[in-house]
Image (spheres, grey):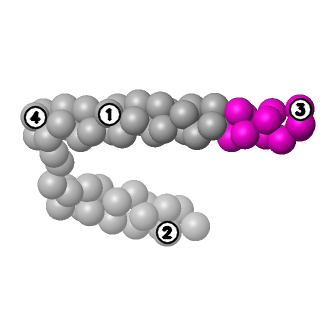
Amino acid sequence: MFQALKNYIIGSYVEMKKVTWPTKEQTINYSLVVIGLSVFLVVFFAILDNIFNFGVSKIITR
């Protein structure tokens, strides 16, 4: 059991050395894209929610 755990840890370490990590600029750009997309989706769904709310309230109050 300990040999399997040791092999797993060693294998994980070897694989992590093969990873190409993003640069600082790439990380900042990716973060800005995620933040921008999140803000856009919040606004989009808020507008949809208000439209549906208005429509349902018009149907109910008839």
Q: Dominant secondary structure of the magenta stretch?
A: helix
What secondary structure is marked by label 1? helix
Q: Nearer the viewer, residue 42 or 50?
A: 50
56 in relation to 18, above or below? above
Instruction: Please tell me how crowded label 2 is: few (under 14), some (14-19), or many (20+) other residues with Cα within 10 Å.
Output: few
Q: Is residue 1 above or below residue 61?
A: below
Crowd rating for badge 4 (residues with CA inside 10 Å; few <14, some 14–19, many 20+): few
Find residue 12 and report its horizontal and vertical position in percent: 34, 60
Name the N-terminal-most of marks 3 and 1.
1
Tag 1 and tag 2, C-beta contact below 8 Å: no
> Which residue is labeled 1 in the image?
36
What number is the disc on residue 25? Answer: 4
Q: Which mark is residue 61?
A: 3
Of labels 2 and 3, earlier in sequence is 2
Q: Position of residue 17 (x, y in %)?
A: 19, 56
15 and 50: which one is in front? 50
**CB under 8 Å between callouts 4 and 2?**
no
Which circle's residue, 4 or 2, is located before the other in the chain?
2
Q: Which mark is residue 16?
A: none
Magenta segment: does it hold 59? yes
Q: Residue at x 54, y 34 (%)?
A: 47
User: Comparing marks 3 and 1, which lies closer to the viewer?
Assistant: 3
> Type of residue at label 1?
Gly
